[in-house]
Image (cartoon, rainbow, N blue to C red):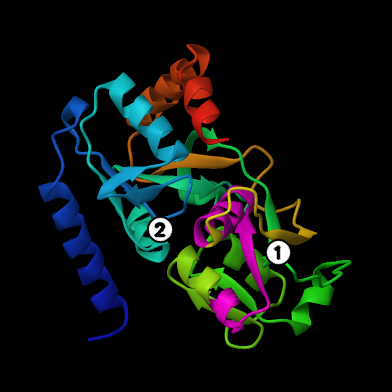
Amino acid sequence: MSGPSFRHLSIALSLLALLLGSQPASAGADIIVVTEELPPYNMTVDGKLTGMATEVVQAVLDEVGEQAHIQSMPWARAYDIALNSENVLIYSIARTPQREALFKWVGVIAPTRWHLFSLPGKQFHLKNLDDARRYQIATVKQDVGEEYLLDRGFVIGQNLQSSNKYEHNYKKLKAGRVDLWISNDLNAHYLVRQASGNPDETAVAQLELDDLGGADGLCMAFSQSTSDEVVERFREALAKVRADGRYDAIAKKWL
């Protein structure tokens, strides 16, 4: 089976699995929370979902009294569920002009800056994005970095290689299958340090992409069909988590 019918069936089965694993939410609704493996923002360690953004989201859930179970999955699947279903909360998502009307935005939960990176020991001397077109660049399927490059004329299968996970892109770099990868700073440096075992080793930023991912950082957002009342409760809860020091305490652990 292929095409839209298969995709809708896949979404329905995914939602059923998520609902069966979740607790009833307040105000008579079931909140489904989806994310991806994006260390150190959201990542599974010893079977437990953790990371800076995850801790902030959990603090917001606690503040509103929700017991929703957070599910980690490939970004394309999480994004599809959030686009097509009611009462779905997705994080960590960049707020871009292309996405603005697709979601109901709660707020920023983590800082981010984006670059084209290489492994240590490499230098490409990129002056602008056009200089990168002759290289092979690793992306993650349907994430904001891939969207950014596609919008600027890069092509999957020509100068882009798309994967489901950021870890896969790092492996491509190590194997010499790609030259660069597009990532935010925390994720890129985390992957290099984890792979090398050296806490002082970092990815090498080859070109800053200061117009990517929004000026403020990564966000949490609801699907468009979610009620405004639910979204507003989460906005108020996030504001309280920021105001009472809980956000700063979480950020201090990870930044």
Q: Are marks 1 and 2 in contact (CB under 8 Å)?
A: no
Q: Position of residue 68 (x, y in %)?
A: 22, 37
- Determine the residue positioned at 64% across, 64% down: 182
Magenta span: chief secondary structure? helix
Give the Cα separation between the discs numbered 1 and 2: 23 Å
- Farthest residue, direction front: 198
What residue is at 61 percent from the left and 83 percent from the top? 176
Q: 10 Å neighbourhood of mark 1: few (<14), some, or many (≥20)?
A: many
Picture quadrant where residue 84 is located: bottom left
Q: Secondary structure at mark 1?
A: strand
Q: Three-letter amino acid code at disc 1?
A: Leu
- Where is mark 1, residue-wise? 116
Q: Is residue 1 magenta?
A: no
Q: Is residue 229 visible?
A: no
Count of all numbered marks drawn on residues in the image: 2
Tag 2 secondary structure:
helix
Give the magenta-colored segment's residue range: 172-195
Which of 1 and 50 lies nearest the eye of the viewer? Answer: 50
Residue type indicated by callout 2: Tyr
Identify the disc placed on residue 79. 2
| x and y percentages locating residue 46 in the rendered image | 28, 49
Q: Residue at x 33, y 51 (%)?
A: 44
Q: Nearer the viewer, residue 129 or 119?
A: 119
Residue 213 point in image, percent of width and height: 63, 50
Quarter of the view holding residue 111: top right
Sort mark 2 into few (<14), some (14-19) or many (20+) by Cα contacts within 10 Å: many
Pick the residue in front: 110 or 142: 110
